[in-house]
Amino acid sequence: MQRLRLELKAETDRSYDVLIGRGILNDLHREIKRIGSFSSYGLVTDDFVRPLVAERLQANLRSHDINSELLSFPPGESSKNMEIVLQLCQQLIARGFDRKSLLLAIGGGVVGDVAGFAAAIYMRGIPYIQVPTTLLAQVDSAIGGKTGVDLPSGKNLLGVFKQPLLVVSDPDVLITLPVEARREGFAEIIKASLIANPELFSLLEKEGTHLLEPANEVLESIIAMAVEVKCRVVSQDEHESGLRRILNFGHTLGHALEAASHYSLTHGQAVAAGMGVAIQFSQKWAGLGQDEAERALSLIRSIGLPTGLPGEVNSESLLSALEKDKKIQGNICHFVLISKIGQAVIHAMPVEDLKESLDKFGTN
Ligand SMILES: NC(=O)c1ccc[n+]([C@@H]2O[C@H](COP(=O)([O-])OP(=O)(O)OC[C@H]3O[C@@H](n4cnc5c(N)ncnc54)[C@H](O)[C@@H]3O)[C@@H](O)[C@H]2O)c1
């Protein structure tokens, strides 16, 4: 098991551990008892993860004298809304949860964001633990304290920062994850390697196509290395006023691409394509060498993700999506680029350059 720590410099008492290890969910009772005693325990999950992980976990906790209530909602992004949060809070009230209760978010990014948000607002805030069950959640969404829900007009428009007390990631639960969901996670892992960890990049390169195998032996180390990047960045900039923006590598364009393609691409495909374009921009604007650019592009392709814009998306539709997303201000768009593998830089790009570059580099 690896125990990493997300240090929050401003208030060290809100710093927390991120535990990563195969089979560690069997010891969750010990970790819960180590961090405190609580009046009641709510296991929040989705209906799909409930029988896969949450019911087993509930039985395990019960055998160690931790009795909990199981609360679940339908899986998927369509559940990331205020209605589900309100239903959750009403169920907590009905079951007598108070300010000394603890919530556990057991699921992918949707469960983590919804349960974290409910924990942030229920009785002005109660503690919660993240138990991520998708690769994306284990390396990204469960860490860093961003919680919230979507509005009909856009994703993640309501939310707060609410750090968990603990994150517990067991790679064994990923065995049931479909390959598409694995790719979503690897898009974020490759991002972490490109912006801040060349050793992780080399390991990913070495593993190549084995990365997608469900029982990959090095997955635990890969997750830990990606988590270390996120912890390092968030600990220096919890509220995304500076450094945390480097986590947006591939995402600025990725989000625009999702919108411009009318959500025909998955989030991971859009981020991968966004990284592909950012890598080519990096050669022109940040001094990234040809050899490193090619290695980065071929790593993304090796796990079955695209590195360029799909044919139906053109620079006009992307620029208009970037504008709508408020990413262009005063004729400038800030892009995260890399000057070498493992080194991110922020580049202020005038719209004219952006349009020209998109026309030139956007395609595969
Ligand atoms: N808070 C953050 O910092 C942050 C960062 C990145 C993404 N996000 C959010 O995360 C969400 C995406 O997360 P996601 O990709 O985990 O999606 P998800 O939570 O919708 O999970 C995807 C699907 O996988 C299923 N699933 C979960 N665990 C499984 C398992 N072990 N085996 C088989 N199936 C399993 C779920 O039931 C769901 O159907 C988005 O809403 C996004 O906005 C948040």
Image (tube, rainbow, N blue to C red):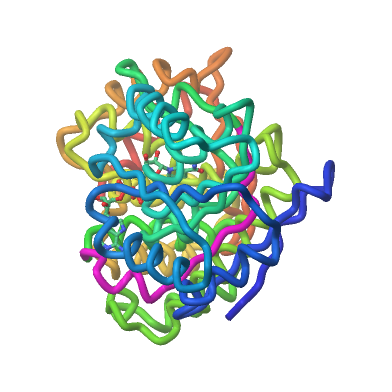
Residue at figure coordinates x 24%, y 69% from the top left: 176
On screen, residue 202 versus residue 155, left or right, reads right
Question: Which residue occupies the extreme bottom position in the image?
Answer: 217
Mark count: 0
Q: Position of residue 57 (x, y in %)?
A: 40, 66
Residue at figure coordinates x 46%, y 40% from the top left: 115
Q: Position of residue 87 (x, y in %)?
A: 35, 27
Residue at figure coordinates x 59%, y 76% from the top left: 199
Give the position of the N terminus as an image quadrant: bottom right
Q: Which of 316 and 163 is in front in this view?
A: 163
200 vs 276: above or below: below
On screen, residue 3 versus residue 297, left or right, reads right
Q: Nearer the viewer, residue 136 or 362?
A: 136
Q: Is residue 69 visible?
A: yes
Q: Can residue 193 be seen in this view?
A: no
Q: Is 75 in the magenta?
A: no
47 vs 331: above or below: below
Please tell me in which quadrant of the rendered image residue 137 appears: bottom left
205 vs 18: above or below: below
28 vs 257: above or below: below
On screen, residue 26 versus residue 233, left or right, reads left
Residue range (magenta): 161-178
Q: Position of residue 363 (x, y in %)?
A: 26, 45
Residue at figure coordinates x 45%, y 22% from the top left: 157
